[in-house]
Amino acid sequence: MAGITIDGVRKSFGATTALEAVNLEIADHEFVALLGPSGCGKTTLLRIIAGLETQTAGRVLIGGRDISALPPRARGLAMVFQNYAVFPHLRVRENIAFGLRMHGADSARIARQVTRTAGLLRLEPLLDRYPAQLSGGQRQRVAVARALAVEPAVLLMDEPLSNLDALLRLDMRAELKEVLREAGTTTIYVTHDQTEAMGLADRIAVLHAGRIEQIGTPSEIYHHPATRFVGGFVGSPPMNFLARDGRLLGIRPEDLDIVATGDGLPFRVNVVEPLGAQTLLTGIAEGHLVRVALNGEHHVPPGAELHIRPRPERIRWMDATTGRAIPPGTEPSP
Amino acid sequence: MRGRALPYLLVAPAVIFLTVLFFVPLVQTIALAFETRTGFGLGNFLRMEDDLNFHDAVVNTFRFVGLAVPLQLAAAMGMAMMLRHLGRGRDLVLWIWTIPLGLSDLAAGLVWLALLNDRGYIASLLFHLGLVAEPQSWLTYETPIALFAAVVIAEFWRATAIVVVILVAGLQLVPKEYAEAASVFGASPWRIFTRITLPLMKPSIQSALILRTVLAFEAFAVVIAIGGRNFPVLVSEAYNWQNFNQEPSVAAAYAVVVMCLSLLATVVWLWLLKTPAEQRA
Ligand SMILES: Nc1ncnc2c1ncn2[C@@H]1O[C@H](COP(=O)(O)OP(=O)(O)OP(=O)(O)O)[C@@H](O)[C@H]1O
Ligand SMILES: [Mg+2]
């Protein structure tokens, strides 16, 4: 049993508050992605769970047991550090074996796990090198392998794939997902990358300025953002917002249709980005920056005057002052 | 032309300084050590070796180096790790610890002499407390172990701080994140120390050991102040031959022996504790 409960955790560093009362409930075997802008407190939260930082207030429970007073080594978890922290004086092989050695595993198990995780992360040819002889991305994979090798009940990963090329990242993402599901590892996965979060996670927690803005399945987060921030942060390109008497009309770029002149909102195209599967138009409507994503290739000249219309069932209403979503049923008509 | 000469001009002061004050005396000393009435030879070394005190001086020197240096390293390591866990008082504690460094070694020796001799503070205190029947004397040839301990203690007190300073500086070069990672992966504080911190500090431990070993082979004022002629070491014997026996060439032979020991110790530390570039923090 390795569910994680984060109960009212607050953290201040002197005058700056990194986390304000974070509450989060993560089920056993669950994969939760922690998504948020730089400096919002993601690393701080992971370090508190790992026991490397002491929270100013609140509790952390793993498997129902309050671990707030336990040192890191007694918490039974593994972590991939944002800056890798791969031991420079140990070869890749010994780095990967480190956790198992500390837990007193026998040499057969150590050898097996090193081979397995090194294979998974494509590190076999590098096993006898020192970290200084590796590229940044290779070092990052050593950090991931070191954490996977101990087969932890709880795994904390701080942007574990951030330094890999797009193709390798795609591969690694799929393999991580499979391995962690098979092992039933409870995982918290910090990332900036929305596609990564959407693709990997059972649920996504969006963190903003030391608070959890929303937690939900990828589809809930994407289609029903709880706040303006979530709509504007999740999704690439982000949600568009238009002002409507004290309210905000939120609409995803792919939920805007081009319509005949005289029908819908006038939209002046500034930039056209053909992305292959989609064509992205950026322009101005009602004085706001608006992005429209069209399926397939469209040849629209920059400066064109088009008309756009939001699909009514896809509109999300937000309160303009609080930025919170207005529950369905109380919204006005577009 | 000027551009090409400039680098040589810039290193010239250092080269001249080293030549005049270091290299020339060194060559002279070596020459003196091998010079005998009948030409060049090992005569001075044979006379040195024949002397009654020579054996004691060698044994004492090695015992002294062999005990003082490891003690200092271990204690300095402990002190450096303690400082790391100290919050605000850190700088103050480090400052207090380094006070002995400001004293000349003769003064340090005299301080300990005043504490430890038979009319010294410690003997009087023990006498007044009734713990000893009469003031004891520890610093004579009749109490060789106490005398040796006193010399080591005085040197330990005087020169451990320099090791602390070197190790503290070295420790600051080792990022905290490695110890953190080790603790997350299940390492106890002791294993973090032996598996992570110590190996990563090898370069600064090496510097400290080289410095301390060389200086311990040359320890003089502290030894003379406390041990006098009851605790001969190589350097104090060189001094005696030069000053009392008026035999500069035998003194020079001693100096050459001390120099060779220092060089040897340096080479040993360089080799034993070498850290290839790819394994550095
Ligand atoms: N040791 C510290 N002392 C003071 N402030 C800190 C410390 N560590 C973090 N902070 C502050 O806490 C806030 C959260 O930092 P944190 O490292 O958790 O951000 P993050 O979400 O991981 O960002 P990134 O995505 O850039 O890694 C930041 O404003 C940071 O400046
Ligand atoms: Mg971070």
Image (cartoon, coloured by chain):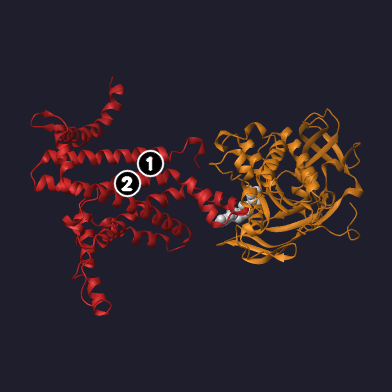
**SS label for mark 1:** helix
| A60 up-or-down from B251: above or below | below
The residue drawn where x is 40% and y is 44% is B206
Q: Is mark 1 within 8 Å of ligand 1?
A: no
Residue A49 shown left or right of residue A198 in the figure:
left
Residue A76 shown left or right of residue B173 in the figure:
right
Amino acid type for the residue under numbered disc 2: Thr
- Which image quadrant for residue B27? top left
**SS label for mark 2:** helix
- Which image quadrant for residue A68? bottom right
Q: Report which colour depicts chain A.
A: orange
Protein chain holding label 1: B
| A295 up-or-down from B88: above or below | above
Give whichever of discs 2 and 1 has the lower sequence position.
2
Residue nearest the viewer, comparing A106 with B152: A106
Q: Where is residue B236 drawn, in percent x and y?
A: 18, 49
Protein chain holding label 2: B
Q: Is mark 2 within 8 Å of ligand 1?
A: no
For mark 1, what is the residue? Answer: B269
Residue nearest the viewer, comparing A87 with A165: A87
The residue drawn where x is 62% and y is 54% is B186
**Tag 2 and tag 1 share a subunit:** yes
For mark 2, what is the residue? Answer: B213
The residue drawn where x is 62% and y is 35% is A127
Amino acid type for the residue under numbered disc 1: Trp
Q: Badge 2: few (under 14), some or many (20 or more) residues near its Cα, within 10 Å?
A: many
The residue drawn where x is 23% and y is 67% is B115
In whole angstroms, how far apart are the C-alphas of marks 2 and 1?
9 Å
Q: Report which colour depicts chain B.
A: red
Q: Where is residue A95 drawn, in percent x and y?
A: 61, 43
Numbered badge on residue A27:
none
Q: Where is residue A96 drawn, in percent x and y?
A: 64, 43
